[in-house]
Amino acid sequence: MTLTLFIFASMFVLGLTGLTFHRTHLLSALLCLEGMMLSVFIALSLWTLQFNSINFSSSPLLLLAFSACEASVGLALLVATARTHGSDRINTLNLLQC
């Protein structure tokens, strides 16, 4: 395992453990998701540069576009839950209430 692969794998695992164990606020969960997407984006970009493949050169940009859409939807949900529930704590969100 090369050093760069180890670094990006550990970045992804740290984001995943942060998402798993520190789920108190919606904003922290969204930041962990963005960290995971950023590590996947950088690893995919370096992978296409390493193999000099033109066929896969658009996949990092497509991933970045989906990540930006995911971030905007997450922030919109954060604003909506902060307006309706008064905070962004995940424990206060109950899906059974109307």
Image (tube, helix red, strand yellow):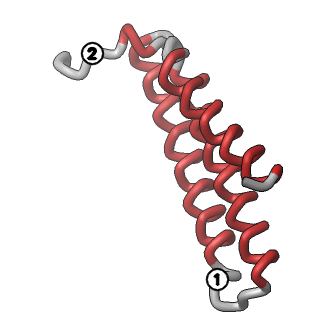
Q: Is residue 31 above or below residue 91?
A: below
Mark 2 = which residue?
94
Place residue 7 in its image quadrant: top right
Mark 1 = which residue?
56
Q: Position of residue 64 (x, y in %)?
A: 65, 62
The secondary element bearing badge 2 is classed as: loop
The amino acid sitting under disc 2 is: Asn
The amino acid sitting under disc 1 is: Phe
Question: Is residue 95 left or right of 82 when viewed as pictured?
Answer: left
The secondary element bearing badge 1 is classed as: loop
Q: Position of residue 45 (x, y in %)?
A: 75, 68
Q: Position of residue 92 (x, y in %)?
A: 37, 9
Q: Who's the residue at 50% across and 45% down the image? A: 73
Dot label at residue 77:
none
Q: Is residue 4 above or below residue 87?
A: below
Instruction: Please tell me which of labels 1 and 2 falls first in the chain.
Output: 1
Front: mark 1 or 2: 1
Question: Is residue 21 left or right of 56 when viewed as pictured?
Answer: left
User: If the image is split into quadrants, where does the C terminus sit?
Assistant: top left
Q: Is residue 13 above or below residue 26?
A: below
Q: Who's the residue at 46% across and 34% down the image? A: 77
Q: Is 21 in front, or is 7?
A: 7
